[in-house]
Image (spheres, helix red, strand yellow):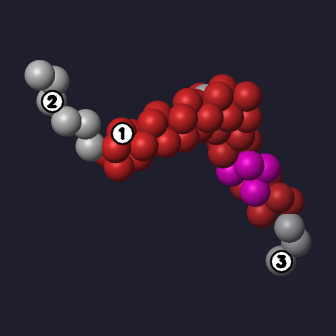
Amino acid sequence: MSQPVNLNRFRKDKARAEKKARADQNAAVHGRSKAEKELDRARADEAARDLDGAKKT
């Protein structure tokens, strides 16, 4: 005789797996790598420093 299956757990596990798959797909399509984020942050910091250096007091 087989073990009983908890249908609520089965349903929730299936929903979690679908949600994770959708999140992984969105991350691949829309996400940026850590290196890209750091490069953008470094460029913004450099631009801010250049702007501060060019301001007249």
How much space separates mark 3 and mark 2, taking CA atoms? 79 Å
Residue at 27 percent across and 43 percent down: it is: 6
Residue at 68 percent across and 51 percent down: it is: 45
Q: Secondary structure at mark 1?
A: helix
Residue 46, position as x, y percentages in the image: 72, 46
- Determine the image quadrant of residue 5: top left
Residue contact at pointers 1 and 2, CB within 8 angstroms: no
Residue 10's tag is 1
Depth-wise, is mark 3 or mark 1 nearer the camera? 1
Quarter holding the N terminus is top left
Q: Earlier in the sequence, mark 1 or mark 2?
A: 2
Residues rendered magenta in the picture: 44-48
Depth-wise, is mark 1 or mark 2 nearer the camera? 2
Circle 3 residue: 57
Q: Residues within 10 Å of mark 3 (few under 14, many from 20)?
A: few
Residue type at tag 2: Gln
Query: Does residue 49 appear anywhere in the picture?
Result: yes
User: As rendered, which of 57 and 26 lies closer to the eye?
Assistant: 26
Circle 2 residue: 3
